[in-house]
Image (cartoon, helix red, strand yellow):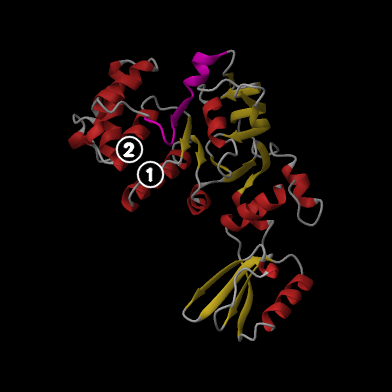
Amino acid sequence: MFQTTKGDRLATAQQPNQTSDTRPFAFELRELSKVYDWGKGTLVRAVEDLSLSVPSGQVVGLLGPNGAGKTTTIKMMCGLVTPTGGHVHLNGYDIARERPMAVRQVGAVLEGARNVYWSLSAWQNLLYFGRLKGLSRRLIVPRAESLLRSLDLWERRHQAVGGYSRGMQQKVAIAAALITDPPILLLDEPTIGLDVQTARTVKDWIARLAHEQGKTIVLTTHQLALAQELCDRIAIIHRGRLLTDLPVRELLAHFRQETYEIRLGGPLASSTFPWLDGFSVTSEDSESLIRGPISDQERLYDLLAQVRAQHLPLIAVEPVEPNLEDVFVQMLKEGE
């Protein structure tokens, strides 16, 4: 499933919940499964035997390709989808048996859904969602004002959200998720469609919420650079199964010195040579750059022999620090 030099990574991936952190888990997913019945005998396993535990105050990136089961997992965590099997515990509360207390532990912003009511103003939305989760108006009002001022929405708080820009609507959705001050925040693609400045504001908020206020944040995103920047740990799922769950630095360390860049003085005649399978090839300024994983020196020498056969000047060969995108691609390849 998750292999490097045969045993090391596989052992790590098969023990995703081990941690030296002594803090209590903010959430625990135990053998969580979801099977959809599409009728006529068609069953789709969206999530299968997923176990994941995360301590309080961390940002965990829940990553995977489209259809991996990320959004289904998020929806099971916030009580919108009923699991077929397994358990969800939020700050110790079982969402199946202690639902009222469990859902109070969570705020959620779901991608592709209307997280707030567009016909209401930002102010009305925050009052509504605060009351919906049992807060008194006396508590809601100061929190709503603080959130709207922090997100630069105070001056337009009485305007209907439907007339806001996409970025402003996303800010209101985040404020609505935070109005009850939940200890756990579920963010499904929180910066998608946002301009650079608004995305930066959201990223700063995520970092502050986790590291200054001690909230636990589950972040799903296809923006791997964002995940690498914000997350303390990464959980990668594929076809509903967990491939790995590790701190970011530890995950990247497993792939260190395995990724190389080979720079050539000219364009490659073709970037689809079989020997380039698994490598990225880019050309710019009359140079070509081959980048990808190389597990040992023999593989490197074989690749260089193929490069020499193209009669292009060899400018440089050097190992590079892997980024999360490199790791993600390699993990999915091994996960197959």
x and y percentages locating residue 209 in the rendered image: 43, 38
Q: Is residue 27 above or below residue 291?
A: above
* In this rendering, position of residue 60 left or right of residue 166: right
Q: Tell me which label, 2 or 1, sits earlier in the chain.
A: 2
Q: Position of residue 214 (x, y in %)?
A: 48, 36
Disc count in the image?
Answer: 2
Front residue of 179/281: it is 281
Label 2's element?
helix
Residue type beneath disc 2 = Lys
**Is 244 displayed left or right of 120 in the figure?**
right
Along the horizontal axis of the image, is 231 left or right of 8?
left
From the image, tell me which residue sits under label 1: 202
Please report contact status of discs 2 and 1: CB closer than 8 Å, yes or no. Answer: yes
What residue is at 27 percent from the left and 34 percent from the top?
148
Which label was assigned to residue 79? none
What residue would you read off at disc 2? Answer: 171
Measured as percent of width and height from the top left, residue 323 is found at 57, 59
For the view shown, which residue lies furthest in the front direction? Answer: 40
The 10 Å Cα crowd at callout 1, few under 14, some 14 to 19, many 20 or more, is many
Q: Is residue 110 magenta?
A: yes
**Mark 2 burial class by Cα count in 10 Å: few <14, some 14-19, many 20+:** many
**Image position, residue 265 (x, y; %):** 56, 84
Q: Is residue 135 visible?
A: no
Q: Distance from label 2 to label 1 (Cα)?
A: 8 Å
Residue occupying image coordinates x 53% and y 34%: 71
Q: Residue at the right extreme?
A: 6
Say which element carries label 1: helix
- Looking at the rendering, the stretch of residues picked out in magenta corresponds to 98-114
Residue occupying image coordinates x 35% and y 33%: 173
Q: Amino acid at mark 1?
A: Val
